[in-house]
Amino acid sequence: MEREKTEGAARYGMVVDLDRCNGCGTCSVACAVENNVPPAGERANARNGISWLRVQRVEAAGEARAAFVPMLCQQCGDKTPCASVCPQNAVELDPGSGIVAQVPVRCLGCRYCMAACPYHARSFNWWDPEWPGRLAETLNPEVSTRTRGVVEKCSFCSHRLQAARAALAAAGKGAALAAEYVPACVEACPAGAISFGNLDDPGSDVARLAQAPGSFRLLERLGTGSKVYYHTEREWVRRLADGRAAAGDGRNHG
Amino acid sequence: MTTTRRDLLFGLGGGFAGLALTPVPWKLLDDVSIWTQHRRALPVPARGPVAWKAAACTLCPGGCALRVRCVGPRPVSIVGEPRHPLGGGACAVGLTLHHLAYHPLRLAGPARRLGDRREPVTLDSALATISSAIAAAGRTRQSVMVLDRRPGRVVSQAWLELLCGLPNGVYATVPGEEATLAAFGQATPLGIDLEHTRTLLSFGAPVLDGWGRPGRVLGVRGGLRVVQVDAWRSASAALADEWVPVAPGSEGALALALAQVLVTADPARAPQPARAALAALAPAQLAQRIGLEPQRIAALAQALAAGRPAVAVGGGEAGAGPLSPDNERAIALLNVVLGSLGHEGGIVARRPLPEAGRGGTGATFASLAEVPEGSVRVALLDAADDGRALPWPLLARTLARDALVVSLSPFDGLLARRASLVVPAPAPLEGLDEILPTADAALASYALSSPLLPQPAGALDAVALVQRLAAATGVAVDAANHQQRVTQRVAAITATGRGRLLARTGAGYEAAKPADADAAFALLAQGGVWIDAPDTSSLDAGRCPLPSAAALEAWSRPAEAVADLALVAFAARGTAGSTPVSPLLTKLYQESDLRAATRVAAIHPRTAGLLGLREGQAVRLESAAGAASASLRFDERLAPGRVAIAAGPEPSALHPEAKRTESGALAVAESGHDGTWRQTRVRIREA
């Protein structure tokens, strides 16, 4: 079902340059700091931990350089699989920004959305969040903390969009377009590998990069209309993107 | 009309059916999600006015400039300064710098160790203990040693003033990324003209994973061909244009083999003593020791010659520790052969940073490995951290039987736990600190990290500690406090009239001309930076470092077959020092495969098969130095006969509440006489 667009709406999206990404993990940590994602408990691992943005290292036999792929919610378009299965309306596609938001207080913890997400970009809170020592004093007041039993995921730091809109409105510049808005991962990337902006603005860097040769979306054949693009000049990395090619030995350490 | 039981049932049934058509069930469903959530268990962050403040990361020598977002008095997030003229951005460890003052391992005040526990003591009592031990050292002619992991600061000067007033002061350091450049033995500091370098040959240095000023390396990466020589597929090897896997400890042998190929083709590339030394080496035996085919070595040498300007760097890996001086001299010799010394795109002179204060020459300057065994009565471990590993046996070797070890670290880290006494210094973002030029810097620079948080009552600034100790031991030191000393140094820098002072503005950085030293200090405290002018003096081209005869002879012999596995230690910079990392780094070390934790040991499947071990199995690593627990992971890119394990971050930093167990490379690292732990042999068995 095509949704109606709000007048003056944006469609925020991201292009990750995999040839620039050096796998430092700064985006992942910046995301956790910004969104009050708690540290892992002792029993947590890559499968049951909470990561809104996780960097995957992939290698292929015969290729000198590994590729690092930041994996986050791909912010699907109108056919968002997670939204369509949620019995609680806890997943909302904002027509004004194109952001797929998760509303944790509505979440029942059924995890249908996790099963539906083809990108494994959602995390379930298996344990009550804990910040050791006095670390809770460093939490970001712009983002509420989540409890055990709910699902959470990347929101493109939508609270920053709200703040940018509010600041623009307060300055009398209108609230529709927030040019100052960037998610925490984009801001933190020391390699400048992540571009962000309005995909519907043909003059924006992100719109140009998304259409550039070498740009692709993960599992594009599923038609999810995701708004996270990746870019690389390396053919073997692009082949991995549709999920059919094998990832070489795919092993990593360190 | 009478109401029958059937009417009642119809009514109830109809009522329930009708209810299903109302919003009530949906509201109930909604509420179930709320009832099942434990919202009272969640912390509610306090709100307040938001302000962005300038700071700098002090967790490693990189000194990345930061912008800290504060809500009220509390820092809540950090970003690397993107437009910094020396290279922008910050790493994942730096982005959690603000967590450290709140870390569970934070020490609140002075304490002494009693067995496995720690007992709080007063500052006066702690100072009396140290003074008494210093006096005892004077009587017994034993040494008072200060270990400084970040030399060159005004705090370092203060330590030198104290040590120079003592009859037996030793100022010790541990070689870092600067070791290759120091091996040239030039009178002036050296740097690398990376902006014009075409090929960077790294002998185990993590050049693409936190080396030098990381933002600078990222900035030049596009035009730089990186060749990584590493015993395993490290993060830098995975990002390099070419990875050259070698046997652990054979870095110097490969440097000599490459130099030999180049000098054989063109003898004029090296002065006579080096030519003779290289001619005496047998290429086949060198190749066998390195673990590479001679053809690959020849091809690599030709690529280096074709890709000039080329620079070779070594050491500096945070977990693997320094290369031996002989290895570093071999790498320096290769640089001479490549013609990179004193040329554009190569290794260039950098002016020394102006000092302030008296300093002194009465103390003995030494690398920690050079300090005589059992000679130290008092070891004072400065709080400054370089983010690199330091195995306890390397330090313990120098200690006398009744030595007093005093840690100034603000954290209950690896070395602090071994110390007899702790006198915690301010944590990061609590005290003033200096940012000095990195090892790779071609230009001298100077910046400051200003305190954003108040320091706790129990913390004592290192300069204040020096002054208290000096008063107690009768040594005359400068009375200026830390900030006054920094201001004096800023005055000395501006007095040179060299370089430019850039003030941080909303749009970036602008040249500024402060009226006096106080104004210059204020600009630097607000995120400004001073950058020196280029040094145009020429280097002493006649100096050609040579490895020792013993090393040349050893590299010429075939490698001995040994049954035990060779330890390959590694760590990301900033994660293996005495400062713990934030528990939030579990996102990288536990909840993803991006970084390997100290509890994971990697070996080749064939090696595991020979030992009868399977993937995921709990194992115990044992060496002459100790033992560590780990779970086994197979890695086909690691050569057989090796085991790779991280030296940090220590598990108690990530999980302070968990039971402490020995894990990681530092638990098994054997310190050699040359101050390295790269020759450690490990046995591995089922736990």
Image (spheres, grey):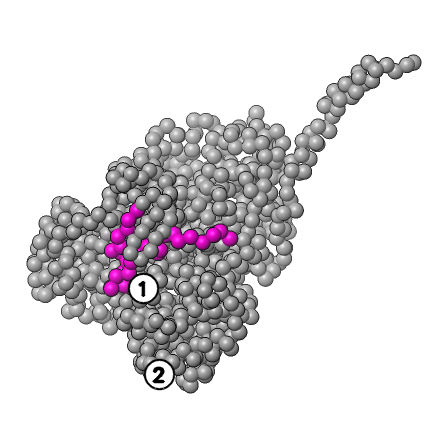
Q: Main secondary structure of the magenta part?
A: loop
The residue that disc 2 covers is B139
Q: Earlier in the sequence, mark 2 or mark 1?
A: 2
Instruction: Locate residue B180 relative to residue B664 in the image: left or right.
Output: left
> How far is disc 2 from disc 1 in space, using C-alphas?
26 Å
Magenta residues span B657-684
The answer to whether the residues at label 2 and label 1 have Cβ atoms under 8 Å apart is no
**Is A167 left, or right, of A243 in this rendering?**
right
The image quadrant of residue B687 is top left
Q: Identify the secondary structure beneath mark 2.
A: helix
B155 or B619: nearer the eye?
Answer: B619
Q: Between residues B206 and A74, which one lies in front from this camera angle?
A: B206
Query: Can you give x and y, in whole percent of width and height, for residue B86 in the image?
Result: 38, 61
Same subunit, labels 2 and 1: the answer reads: yes
In this rendering, position of residue A42 left or right of residue B240? right
Quarter location, residue A59: top left
Which residue is at the far front?
B115
Residue A75 percent coordinates (x, y):
51, 36
Q: Secondary structure at mark 1?
A: helix
